[in-house]
Amino acid sequence: MKKTGTQTIETERLVLRRFVMEDAPDMYRNWASDPEVTRYLTWPAHTGPEITSMILKEWIPQYEQGDFFNWAIIYKENSEAIGNISVVKVQESIDAADIGYCLGRAYWGRGIMPEALKAVIDWLFEEAGMNRVAATHDRNNPKSGKVMQKAGMQYEGVLRQAGRNNQGICDEVWYSILRSEWEKKGR
């Protein structure tokens, strides 16, 4: 793994970039305060904008570390932060990264998250030198699995009652893509 840290990635409709404190109002309004967005996540909906600001104050200094990968998803159409995508776990010994993501409900169903996930996967292979990129979702949230499929990831299996989120103990459904598979797809 190359410790490149979070770098800006641009797609047709999105800019993925480091968070700045000015993103706090968008983050709070667009996704962090919405219990429907956080339903299957491991952190609760923010109960006030001060919590969102506190989280950003924790994240922003971590950008100086080469192994912190956390992008704000900026929608070019309105220049708002509408979600985030990050590497939630790195296994340096095998050059592997696990990704987590969330998106404001107003932006669901538009193909935005598959676009962001594919861009991050490409970047993790090209720039960070990863060999494996994986993601998981609660079995009761199959739409997240569709995102992973659309981004080129393959279904691996279910780890029964292996996770905990805001719904309690849950089955984890795993997807991944290996560098060799990504290269075969002509990336």
Image (tube, rainbow, N blue to C red):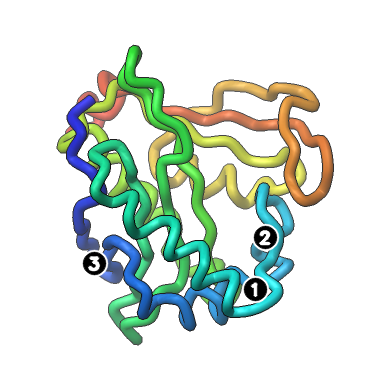
Residue 12 is tagged as: 3
Residue 33 is tagged as: 1
Above or below: residue 168 compared with residue 13: above
Q: Position of residue 68 (x, y in %)?
A: 33, 43
Q: Quadrant of residue 145?
A: top right
Q: Amino acid at mark 2?
A: Thr
Name the residue at 28% across, 50% down. Answer: 119
> Viewed as shown, does residue 170 lie left or right of 7?
right
Q: Position of residue 116 (x, y in %)?
A: 36, 56
Residue 112 is at least partly visible in this image: yes
Name the residue at 26% across, 67% down. Answer: 15
Sequence order check, earlier mark of 3 and 1: 3
Residue 38 is tagged as: 2
Looking at the rendered image, the disc whose residue lies closer to the viewer, 3 or 1, is: 1
> Can you name the residue that lies furthest to the top here?
93
- Whole-number angstrom distance, CA of label 3 to CA of label 1: 27 Å
Quarter occupied by the C terminus: top left
Badge 3 vs badge 1, beta-carbon distance below 8 Å: no
